[in-house]
Image (cartoon, helix red, strand yellow):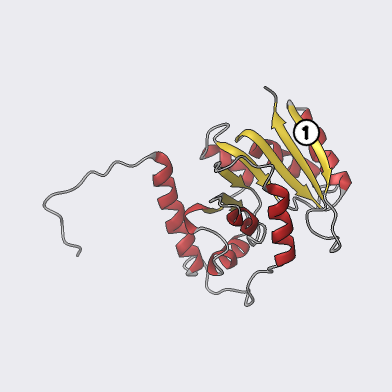
Amino acid sequence: ALPRSSSPRIVEVSLERFLEGVVEWLAMSLSQELFCEGCPVASPPLFVPQRIERLAGFLGPLLPPKGELLEVCCGSGMATQALKQLGYRPWTEDLDSCEVCMALKSGYLDPGRAMVLDARLLDRFFPPRHFDAVVGFMVGLIDEVNWPLWKEILLRSSALARDMVVYTTYTEREARGVAEALRSFGWIVEVVANPDDLGIYDQWACVGRRRG
């Protein structure tokens, strides 16, 4: 039996610090494989330095300095490294527990701010306009079948942004679809071409700012 303390302590912390503690406990448990019988993924997540450097250069002039950021659908955390290079400590979310687990094991994600969660449920944990900016990299691939799902994810996530959102995509069609959805909810949106020689990652960006 555990010893009982004769003098119990009451510790007061902010709600956000408490949430970070719970998230860290869950993330560490995930990375230590306490929620599964074994890891089916043997190799570390993909890491493309060229993409990270280019994304950091693109985001640097856009994002609010020292702001509080949320990255949705973070996947393996590769693009998160661009935010870390710029000095941010973002909250990150993805529904794929294996992706998040491997990112944690590789040190790509911060265990205190890495969540395995459906992005549509983020507003149960954070109030509207809680973050200075919400970002998502290579959202999609988006097609006519899954667009209703992606639209809900991006609009509900964007509601958590105080000032701006940035979403990158593979194609112009995807970026313009995201822009149209954001405009219908009052955002001022610019679609930006961001091509490179690799021709794969973050070729287009949708940059949205709140009116007023």
Dot 1 crowding, Cα within 10 Å, few <14, some 14–19, many 20+:
many
Residue at 29%, 41% in the rendered image: 12
Furthest residue to the left?
Answer: 6
**In the image, residue 119 above or below residue 78:** above
> Quick one: 190 or 85, which is closer to the camera?
85
Element carrying mark 1: strand
Residue drawn at point x = 39 percent, y = 46 percent: 18
Q: Which of the 4 image quadrants contains residue 63?
A: top right
Amino acid on which the number 1 mark rests in the picture: Val
74 up-or-down from 46: above or below: above
Q: Quadrant of the C terminus?
A: top right
Residue 55 seen in the figure: yes
The picture places residue 145, in percent across and down from the top left corner, at 83, 47
Does the image show residue 144?
no
Most foreground residue, 101 or 58: 58
Taking the view exactly as shown, the residue that stands out farthest to the top is 212
Residue highlighted by disc 1: 189
Residue 193, position as x, y percentages in the image: 85, 47
Q: Please state the total of marks drawn on the protein image.
A: 1
Position of residue 158 measured from the top left corner of the image (x, y, whole percent): 66, 36
Report the residue that reaches farthest toward the bottom: 42
Quadrant in the rendering for residue 14: top left
| Relative depth, front residue between 174 and 83 | 83
The N terminus, quarter of image: bottom left
Residue at image coords 66%, 52%: 73
* Residue 102 x, y percent position in the rendering: 59, 68
